[in-house]
């Protein structure tokens, strides 16, 4: 009888992953399960096809299996999800670093920054994935997509500076409120 120690000598997570990869778990099963889960969740929560979960299951399963028929779907997921993991790691590091400057009083003011930062990181990952698959089909997109992203980010940052208040009353209210405030706040 072989003890637990002998079993652990021969067991390796790397070998298990290699077996799963050779049997198609990462290329077929997990992307199909992800597609099925998203479609089933949408159909169940919206009740588009009625409250019958069996019909929702059948539609979601058939859509997932039909989507996985083409190799490009598994290629897309194999490029997208590692990038998503890297993007989430970058966002977590930024959250940890911002924790140095946030307090209980101003953490709500920081949340839009993290929302837009996460959205920009997500867009970069999706565009990079589509670019790797030659989705846009033109070499112009492949060489200039970073410039386009920077231009969109610049417009998004500068747009609030060029938009004024909606009406004169709002403008006067903001002007009177800021006029009574001191220009610089004391440090202590």
Image (cartoon, rainbow, N blue to C red):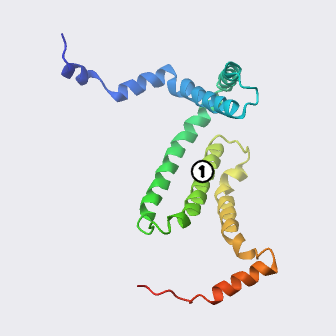
- Which residue is located at x 26 percent, y 21 percent? 10
> Above or below — where is 53 with respect to 167?
above
Residue 166 picture location, percent across and down: 79, 73
In the figure, is residue 97 to the left or right of 120? left
Between residues 143 and 68, which one lies in front from this camera angle? 68
Residue 131 picture location, percent across and down: 65, 46
**Structural crowding at the residue carrying mark 1, measured as other residues with C-alpha within 10 Å and reported as few (<14), some (14–19) or many (≥20):** some
The image quarter containing residue 2 is top left
- Which residue is located at x 51 percent, y 28 percent? 26
- Which residue is located at x 40 percent, y 67 percent? 100
Between residues 181 and 125, which one lies in front from this camera angle? 181
Residue 130 picture location, percent across and down: 65, 43
Between residues 22 and 112, which one lies in front from this camera angle? 112
In the figure, is residue 118 to the left or right of 177? left
> Above or below — where is 70 with respect to 85?
above
Residue under circle 1? 122
- Which residue is located at x 66 percent, y 59 percent? 149
The image quarter containing residue 73 is top right
> Above or below — where is 78 with respect to 141?
above
Residue 163 picture location, percent across and down: 75, 74
Q: Is mark 1 on a helix, strand or loop?
A: helix
Q: In which quarter of the image is the C terminus?
A: bottom left
In the figure, is residue 166 to the left or right of 20? right
Between residues 41 and 162, which one lies in front from this camera angle? 41
């Amino acid at each position: 009888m072989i003890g637990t120690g002998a079993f652990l000598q021969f067991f390796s997570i790397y070998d298990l992953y290699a077996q799963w990869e050779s049997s198609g778990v990462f290329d077929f099963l997990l992307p199909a399960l992800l597609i099925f889960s998203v479609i089933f969740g949408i159909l169940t929560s919206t009740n588009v096809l009625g409250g019958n979960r069996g019909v929702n299951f059948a539609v979601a399963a058939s859509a997932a299996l039909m989507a996985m028929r083409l190799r490009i779907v598994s290629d897309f997921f194999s490029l997208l999800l590692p990038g998503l993991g890297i993007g989430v790691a970058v966002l977590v590091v930024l959250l940890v670093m911002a924790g140095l400057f946030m307090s209980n009083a101003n953490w709500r003011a920081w949340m839009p920054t993290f929302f837009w930062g996460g959205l920009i990181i997500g867009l970069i990952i999706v565009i990079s994935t589509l670019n790797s698959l030659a989705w846009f089909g033109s070499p112009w997109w492949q060489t200039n997509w970073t410039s386009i992203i920077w231009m969109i980010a610049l417009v998004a940052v500068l747009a609030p500076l060029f938009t004024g208040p909606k009406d004169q009353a709002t403008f006067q209210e903001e002007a009177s409120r800021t006029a009574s405030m001191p220009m610089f706040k004391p440090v202590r």
